[in-house]
Each structure stands twice: as structure tokens, then as C-alpha cells.
Image (cartoon, rainbow, N blue to C red):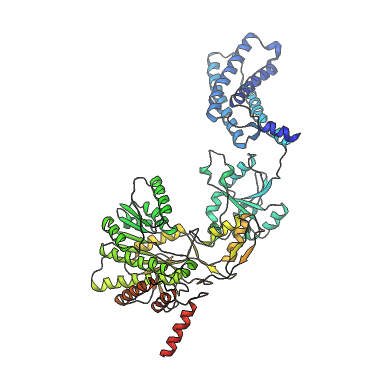
Amino acid sequence: MSKIFENFLSNRVLSRFSIFLIDHLMILFSSISIYLIRYGFSGLTPEVRADGITLTLLLILFNTIFFVSFRTFSGILRFSSFTDLMRIFYALVMGYLLTFIAVQVIFHFDPTFAASNVTFITIFFLNMFLMIFSRILVKETYESITGRSVKPVNVFIYGTKQAGISVAKALKGNSEFNYRVMGFISDEHHMIGKQLMGVTIHANDENLFRTLETKDVKTIIVSPQKMEEIKNSNLLVNFVDHNISLLTTVPVNEWSGTMMSKAQIKDVQIEDLLPRDPIQVNMLQIAENLEGKRVMVTGAAGSIGSEIVRQVATFNPYSIILIDQAETPLHNMRLELQERWRDLRTEIIVADISNAPRMEKVFARTRPQYIFHAAAYKHVPMMEDNVSESVQTNILGAKIVADLAVKYNARKFVMVSTDKAVNPSNVMGCSKRICEIYVQSLAKHLEKTGLHTTQFITTRFGNVLGSNGSVIPLFRDQIRNGGPVTVTHPEIIRYFMTIPEACQLVLEAGAMGHNGEIYIFDMGKPVKILDLAKRMIRLSGTPNVKIEFTGLRHGEKLYEELLNLKELTKPTHHEKIMIAEVREYEYAEVSRQIDNLIKVSYDYDDMRTVKKMKEMVPEFQSINSPFEAVDRLLEKIATNAS
């Protein structure tokens, strides 16, 4: 029966006009009631009645203006929120204020006007009480009849400044949210122990978790302002490790007026919990280099390439040439650029960078001045199984683009490399190391021969958060599907950086580079992938998801190095960017070896191709791979030779 009644109430909503009319009837009732109390029936002389009618008409007139302005009638009564009640308050205050001014004008001309200040103020408070109480009564009656099918979730708010208070008010004043605020958390010592909105403010210390357990709180909502303050610290990690769910909201200025919708409460992302210091770059220097220039980005539809395009677009280049062989992602980039940078000149080119005639035509037509080379195959296990593709795209492609940069007098060529190029243990990492060797030897060769027209810079960094095929999107999908979450090894660790941060450092390294440098980035502290998986599971609120260990994949290390042990580094003016002092190679010999390697790759004999790669990069030692047999063969040859 109650369910039928609940469905009946849910499907019946007073129209806006009905609410508007009821509010005016409350003004009328307030005026009549106070006049009756003040004068009684016998005292309502024709003069008093006339003055009362005048006052009531003025109240209806001015309040109508502000009812419409503040849209006090637009909500559903049973879902009235604190914000709705504040709108009523503001509308009545403004309406009665204008009425009071009008009454004072009447008093000036007619001192006998029957509307004393006491009468006027009493009408105001009765009217205010009726309008607010009616909303609360309807809301409470509806909730008592229908009942709540779900028990409210007890939450703490992290943050006691205006943003945190706004979140708490939104939660308390809107039945759309099924949250009960049980307390606040603050990092400010002078706030600890005080009361705010009827609940206590607690410190983020060892006693907090006992308090949370006592109050049955398993969810903390971090205010958006607080999120910005602490997202690059470890303050939130402890909550996740204690199985506390973390939520946050969009910034208050993105709310609809003073209202927050349910959709604007979101999970705190694992990216916000990784131990990374914020990175600052010299935007002015980058702008000076790119403004008004023709900029080419290869791999422009990939995770890194697309972000480089976005960041370059903000520096007012003359044009951006986007090159990629992935048609659909490149089309998506075209649509994004048309929407966000409508006036920017763009060239969207579907092309394979290892296709020399095609790339020659592109360079001849576009004449790029700055080139960001991000095109490459990057997935380690895939390249272990597709050696020739790794050579032909990563190495041949880089060689073609670098040679064309010289031929068409590009000012700078910035190559995106990887930490997997250091002491490579897989084909992909070795292919990128060979690219580094070629680019650096070409740069030194041009300097020696006096043909120094193009500056070559290499940037080397680790994993980027959220890139295509990276571990975090994979884990997120696995958790969403109920698990298991697959981790290759319990001890595997990786360095992480956000895509925008990585690309900012690429742009800054490109701006500061002169010729032939290999820049490495300070990636912060390494992260244990098992800990990452556990935290993502806890953040998801589904702690029953299991973790499975699948074993290291072909060519995969337990940890990645950003620098070869034999290499040294030099500091730059940016604390996060260093220059690797690496072994230099003779250009003619490197070019000859690469040409031979590319030729061998077209025979599609993986063992022979990998042998050539290992001869070029002696530190390339395969791990958990069939190509370990090549290492043993080369060791045997070296032993026999000695």
C-alpha cells in the first residue's frame, strides 16, 4: 500500500503556477491575519481596511518581481533544498524592502496610514515562516510517508574553508544526496576541536581513524579547494590504505549557481594519490620558441603526441602539422582542434613515417621549423613478437624524419624517447636507444662538418599516467568488470608522470636544448605496481576484487632505469631536467649499421634482426625472452674470439 502511495506522490508534482499562486496566498493570509490580530474585527474600519488592502497590493507587487527574479516557484516542493530556502529568503527581503520604502513615502504624505512598523515587520516574519515552513513540511511529510529505502552514508568533509562549507551545505540541504555529514577534517591547528555546522572538526592524525570507526564513517569527501592543496602530497594515501573511500567535487564556481548536482561528486582518481611533486615550466621561453612557427608533430594522435599538439596550440604557432597513421584517433584530433582552436592553421596528414617518398612530399609542402617526433610503437610484449615492425617504424621512421629535418632546414628536432632505452632488455627499448644514437651522432656530425642547421634534442622519461594501453586504464577496466586485476610480478616498480607534465617538460627541453643533448626527467619516486593495484581497488569501493600475478612478460624488467650506469648527468636551470652524458658514436658507422639493420629486418628473420640490434647496442640483454638465446650466442662468439 505504501509503495502505491509512494508511486502516486512521485508522479504528482505541483505546477510552477500553482506554487506561485500559493506563495501569493500566503502573503494575503499573513496580511489579513496580522491586521485581525492588531485591530480585531471591530477595529477594521473602512479606512484601516483600505490601508491594509493598499499594503497587501504593494507586497504582492514587489514580491512578485523578486519571486520571478529568484525563481522561488521553480523547484519541486518535496525536494526543496537549503538553496531553495535561501532563494525564498532573498526574494522576501528584497520584496519587503521595496514595500517598506513605498510605505515610508505614503507615510510622508499621509501620517495616518494604518501600517505601523511593528505591523509591517510582523507580516514579514509570518510570511517568511509560512513559505519556508511549508517547504519543510512537504519535504518531511513526503520522506516520512515514503521512507528512505537506502540508509544515509555517513561522511566527513576534508576542508573547513568556504569550499568545504559549501559542500557540506549542499549535502545537508538537498535530498538528492544520501549523505549525512558527521564531521570535518582540518590541517589547521586552530580549527581542531571546534564546532562547524553542528559537528566537530577533527585533526588528520592517528586518532582520526578511531573516530571514523566509532561514527561508522567509511567515506570522506575532499573539498575541491583542499584537493588542489594536497593532491601532490601523501595526505590522502593513508585514507585509501585504511579502506576509506575518497570523493571530491568539481570547483564551486562550476556549480549551477549555489547548487551542486549529484553528477558533480566524483571519485578521487589514483593519479591524485601518486607521490609526485608539481612541475613548473618556463612557459615564456617555450612561447618565444613556438609562436609564429610551423610545428610538426609525428604520432600526433597518440597519448603524448596529442597532448603536445594541445600544448603547442596554446602558444600561437603559425601552423601545426599533425602526422599519424591511425585514422580514427587523428580524425578525433581534427574535431577537437576545430572546436577549441578554430582559427589555428592545421594540416591533418594520414601517413606512415617509414614511407620515405610520402614523408618527402609532406616536408617539401609544409616546411616545418619545429618537429616533435613522438611516433613509435611502444608496447614491449607486442614488439618482442613483431621485431621487424619495431625496426621499420621506430628506427627507419625516426631516421627518415631526422634526415628530412636536415634537408628542409628545420630549426629543431625533438625526439621523444623512453627510460626503456637505458640498458634495454627488450626490442622496443633497444629500437629507441638506436634512435637516440642516430639522432645524437647526426647532430655531432653536422657540427663537425659546419652544416649545423638543425638542432637535435632527445627527451627520455618513464611511464605516463593514463596513456593508451598503460596500466591504470587497464586496472580500471578490470576493476569495473569485477576483476581479477592482473599484476605481472609482486615486486615490479615503475616511474610515473602525468601526460601534461611529460609534454611540458618535452617542450621546455626542446626550448633549452642546443644540439645533441639527451635530456632525462626527474620522475619522482618509483611506484610499486602491486600497491597501485591495491589502492585502485580500495578507491573503487569494491574491496573483494582479487589480484592475480601473471608473471613477467617478454622483455619486461622489474624496474626501469632512466640512466645507464656508465652515464653521468649534468644539471640544467630546471631542477626536473638533466642532461645525460652518454657515449658518442661516429655518424658514418652508425648510419651504415642502421642501413644494414633495416635491410635485414625486411627478411623478417627475428633472431638475425635482434642479433644485429645487440651488436649495435651491446648493453641490450634480453630478459624473459626467446632472444636470450642470441645473448648466449654472442657471449660464445666473444669467448672464442678472446
Q: Nearest the camera: 471 or 119? A: 471
Q: Residue furthest left?
A: 450
Q: Residue furthest right?
A: 1
Does 361 appear above or below 593?
above
Does 31 appear above or below 447?
above
Q: Nearest the camera: 378 or 160? A: 378
Does 487 appear above or below 146?
below
Residue at the image position 66 percent from the left and 51 percent from the top: 193
Q: Quadrant of the N terminus?
A: top right
Report the number of discs: 0
Q: Position of residue 112 (x, y in %)?
A: 59, 13
Q: Nearest the camera: 599 or 169? A: 599
Q: Quadrant of the C terminus?
A: bottom left
Residue 429 quadrant: bottom left
Whether residue 333 sits left or right of residue 102 in the image: it is left
| Residue 578 seen anywhere in this rendered image of the structure | no
Q: Position of residue 10 (x, y in %)?
A: 67, 33
Residue 535 quadrant: bottom right
Q: Nearest the camera: 483 or 111? A: 483
Whether residue 284 sits left or right of residue 501 in the image: it is left
